[in-house]
Image: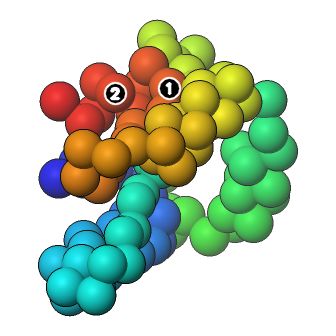
Amino acid sequence: MWLSESLVAAHTASKTATGFTASLVHELGEFGVHAKLVEPGYCPDTRFAENSGSRMAGMIPEAYGAYAQSVLAGFTQPAHVTKATDVAEAVWKAANDVSGQVRFPAGADAVALFR
């Protein structure tokens, strides 16, 4: 199950694809179609934080200001992150898996959330 974080409701809502895929596993499995989920964590090597940060500028309501600062400060030095190689390995595992496993977390932070 996906664990949500503060101030990322839009990102958390995007996890609808996770539930949709999990349903497809059951529905399409009857026809020999398999679906897998590769779920990466935060990868600082990408421009995700930079791009999302600029899009969020000025969008945090004043009432959330102090709270948002404390939450966002925690994102600046995460204890665990995902590397591009973690994602590549998870994709490889998912593509070659025959065990029926559906979810493949990629990266130490994703693995920690997955547990």
Amino acid residing under circle 1: Gly
In the rendered view, would you say 49 is above or below 14?
A: above
Whether residue 70 is visible to the viewer of this picture, yes or no, is no
Residue situated in front as seen by the camera: 43 or 33: 33
Q: Position of residue 21 (x, y in %)?
A: 34, 75
Distance CA(mark 2)–CA(mark 1): 6 Å
For residue 44, side relative to residue 15 (left or right): right
Residue situated in front as seen by the camera: 107 or 67: 107
Residue at the spot x=37%, y=78% of the render?
A: 33
In the rendered view, would you say 11 is above or below 83?
A: below
Residue at the spot x=75%, y=66% of the render?
A: 55
Amino acid residing under circle 2: Val
Whether residue 102 is visible to the viewer of this picture, yes or no, is yes
For residue 64, side relative to residue 45 (left or right): left
Q: Please name the residue that numbered disc 2 is placed on.
A: 111
Bin the neighbour count of mark 2 within 10 Å (Cα to Cα): few under 14, some 14-19, many 20 and up.
some
Most extreme residue toward the top, as rendered? 79
Disc 2 + disc 1, Cβ < 8 Å: yes
Residue at the spot x=39%, y=68% of the render?
A: 35
Q: Position of residue 84 (x, y in %)?
A: 72, 30
The colour mode here is: rainbow
Q: Secondary structure at mark 1?
A: loop
Bin the neighbour count of mark 1 within 10 Å (Cα to Cα): few under 14, some 14-19, many 20 and up.
many
Quadrant where the C terminus is found in the figure: top left
Q: Position of residue 97 (x, y in %)?
A: 39, 43
Residue at the spot x=28%, y=33% of the render?
A: 113
Q: Please name the residue that numbered disc 1 is placed on.
A: 107
Report the number of discs: 2
For residue 63, side relative to residue 53 (left or right): left
Q: Quadrant of residue 114?
A: top left
Q: Secondary structure at mark 2?
A: helix
Q: Position of residue 102 (x, y in %)?
A: 29, 54
